[in-house]
Amino acid sequence: MGARQIYETLRDQIMARVYGTDGLLPSSRALADELGVSRSTVTVAYEQLAAEGFIEIRHGARPRVASAVVDRGRNRATSRPSTRNARLSKFGGRLREGPPGWTEPPRALVANFRYGDLAPSDFPLLAWKKAMVAAMTRKVDRLAYADPCGSLRLRSALQGYLWRSRSVRCDVDQIVVVNGSQQGLDICARLILDAGDRFVMEDPGYLMARYTFAATGAVAVPIPVDADGLDTERLATVEARLAYVTPSHQYPLGGVLPIGRRHQLLAWARKCDAYVIEDDYDSEYRYDTKPVPPLHALEDSDNVVYLGTVSKTLSPTLRIGYLVVPPGLRSMFAAAKQIMDRHTPLAEQDALASMLESGTYDSHVKRVRRRNAERQQALLDALGRRFGDRVRIDGTAAGLHIVAWFDDLPQEREEALIRMAWSKGVGVYPVSSLFDRLRTGRRPQPATVGLVMGYAALEPALIERGCKLLAQAVDELAVRRE
Ligand SMILES: Cc1ncc(COP(=O)(O)O)c(C=O)c1O
């Protein structure tokens, strides 16, 4: 039994409220004995549960179900049933190793640096409401299925937007509107990969992409990332069908792929007849330099599938994204989208189109870019004040998150720091979980503690409070060590 299985079983049991009123789980030693596995295997499972807020671990005590989970359980009649004995397809079976599933984020935190959340006050509510009412009024005139690739109106508006903001020149027919980047990744996975194929992933990288490609039965080839993004030299000996990259702002470390590496990547793709999936997820947020044109804007980019989303600019709840696909693949993307869900909801497409046409979207992006630059500055200032040169920051040039490295804290302290921070009311998340070693069981890649800190949902005052609590957690950890 591996750490993943133990984690899943315990998680299911916690959600089923198996652990009585005191919420105490067995000690790692007792559970290891019971299951006949090593203690470190159990520890990995416990650490994952703690990182996701299911349990609280205190030094010298048995792990306990987190109070936020106990409270939530009281209000919930059902729990997630175990799939262990279900008869599933190979695809279904692989999903058992896939994403950790959905859990409600804890509300009790003072400041949650969870990446991906946006501030509700940034959403352009009035403009969106107006656009949606107009769109609904138009749509009820004709209730009929529509083009799986998306409405011509939205694709035309996106064509103009991509050209003026990202230098991406494409035909409207190359654009496929999807339900967020996630569906775009899923379609790419199904169209390009078969079981046993290989795909290149940035390491560390975006886990949702990895899970999606791996669900086809294809095998990940992790390629290390440095300050300039994917180390393309390492591709020389790699054969793969697909490479997933975030060249404008590597997720999570923030590097921008230099032009030499871009050409090397495209040349590799041509040589292998592989596709490059270019995830341009947060390019609207560049703070220091001019926007970097995507791979897709380069001349030899025939094998590139470009992927964009409004999850960072408007809301991750809208589920609207877009692909720019090679002309020869368009009909296959259309077919895949059609069998998945026919098409993305039309009123939302229409509303987005009218915001793009009227310039409301561009001015909204400008406004939230300014706000997020302020939030990032507040975070950098607060970290600087609290930690001085004990913290090293990656990825400030763009995006909605940074990575904060605590070089005087060895990797082994990461879990303890995260737990301590959570107990003080600050949600922080380890960068180590985005390294491939999680799957392979190799030793942790980063030697020191690194935190992915999203700031787009927090106002500067909360960022300051969160950093103060984080500093207290670090200090307390040091005291306990002595
Ligand atoms: C690398 C990356 N790509 C894409 C997304 C957005 O995904 P979606 O459009 O499915 O919401 C995220 C969100 O966190 C991300 O980190």
Image (cartoon, rainbow, N blue to C red):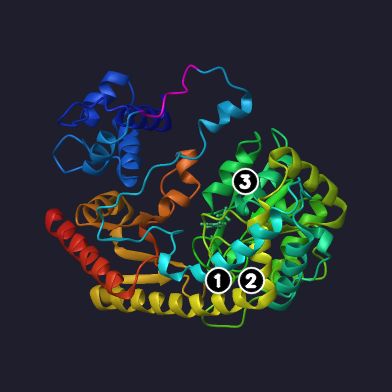
Q: Is residue 14 above or below residue 228?
A: above
The quadrant in which residue 456 appears is bottom left
> Residue 412, can we see it?
yes
Magenta stretch contains residue 129: no
x then y, percent, for residue 35: 32, 20
* Quadrant in which the N terminus appears: top left
| Label 2 with label 1: CB-CB less than 8 Å | yes
Q: Element at badge 2?
A: helix
Q: Amino acid at mark 3?
A: Val
> How far apart are the alpha carbons under marks 3 and 2?
40 Å
- Provide the secondary structure element on which disc 3 rests: strand
Which portion, as a residue range, is magenta? 78-85
Q: Is-magenta flag for residue 79? A: yes
- What percent of the width, then of the height, locates residue 450? 37, 60
Which residue does the numbered mark 3 point to in the structure image? 221
Question: Between marks 1 and 3, how big is the CA–CA gap?
Answer: 44 Å
Tell whether label 2 touches label 3 (CB within 8 Å). Answer: no
The circle on residue 127 is 1
Whichever of callouts 3 and 2 sits on the residue coming sooner in the sequence is 3
Please tell me which residue lies in front, 369 or 206: 369
- Marks 2 and 1, the one that precedes in the sequence: 1
Nearer to the camera, 218 or 358:
358
Q: Position of residue 65 (x, y in %)?
A: 23, 36
Q: Quadrant of ligand 1?
A: bottom right
Crowding around mark 3 (Cα neighbors within 10 Å: few <14, some 14 to 19, many 20+) is some
Residue located 62% across and 23% down the image: 89
Residue kind at label 2, given as amino acid type? Met
Residue 119 visible somewhere in the drawing: no
- Image spot of residue 17 (x, y percent): 27, 28
Residue at numbered disc 2: 355
